Image: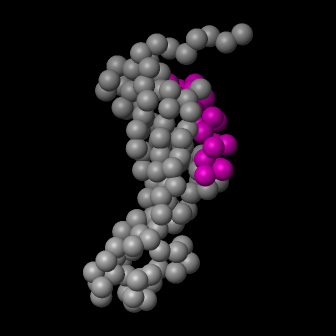
């Protein structure tokens, strides 16, 4: 499960953003994930609380937005959504397209707080 190491890396990156802004806590981490990224959203949801334990992101919400597979066709010079299993141009059928989206894992935003998490129990 490489999702745990991905979550740890994202939390380190979000922690740097929090440090730059003097934040005491991270409330939310928003990602954009493509179907060709090799990332399983369900495993990310499970790994995030483990990876964020004892960090500024402990208790933070993980929000993930799926983005479509997109290709650019050099023949008809169009960009369009494509199927995960068929990267040919959906407009003209040309098979030598260039992938322009759908393989990304992007940290889109980090919601910060200036107050620490209240103590529990």
> Visible in this render: residue 99?
no
Instruction: Report the label total.
Output: 0
Does 30 appear above or below 22?
A: below
Does 23 appear above or below 5?
A: above
Question: Does the magenta run of residues contain 43?
Answer: yes
Residue span colored magenta: 41-58
Location of the N terminus (image quadrant): bottom right
Does 102 appear above or below 54?
A: below
Q: Position of residue 33 (x, y in %)?
A: 49, 55
Q: Position of residue 109 (x, y in %)?
A: 40, 38
> Taking 35 as reference, is 93 left or right?
left
> Taking 45 as reference, is 77 left or right?
left
User: Where is residue 99, by image quadrant?
Assistant: bottom left
Q: Position of residue 113 (x, y in %)?
A: 44, 20
**Residue closer to the observer: 81 or 99:** 81
Question: Does the magenta run of residues contain 50?
Answer: yes
Q: Residue at x 40, y 44 (%)?
A: 108
> Visible in this render: residue 63?
yes
Location of the C terminus (image quadrant): top right
Q: Residue at x 30, y 85 (%)?
A: 76
Prevalent SS, magenta region? helix
Outermost residue on the front side: it is 91
How is this picture coloured?
one colour
Q: Residue at x 53, y 63 (%)?
A: 35
Q: Residue at x 56, y 33 (%)?
A: 61
Does 85 appear above or below 111?
A: below
């Amino acid at each position: 499960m490489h999702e745990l190491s991905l979550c740890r890396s994202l939390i380190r990156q979000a922690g740097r953003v929090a440090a730059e802004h003097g934040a005491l806590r991270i409330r939310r981490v928003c990602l954009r994930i493509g179907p060709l990224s090799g990332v399983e959203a369900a495993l990310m949801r499970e790994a995030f609380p483990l990876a964020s334990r004892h960090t500024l992101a402990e208790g933070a919400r993980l929000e993930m937005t799926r983005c479509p597979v997109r290709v650019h066709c050099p023949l008809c010079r169009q960009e369009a959504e494509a199927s995960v299993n068929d990267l040919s141009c959906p407009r003209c059928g040309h098979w030598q397209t260039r992938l322009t989206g759908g393989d990304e894992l992007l940290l889109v935003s980090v919601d910060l707080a200036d107050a620490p998490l209240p103590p529990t129990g």
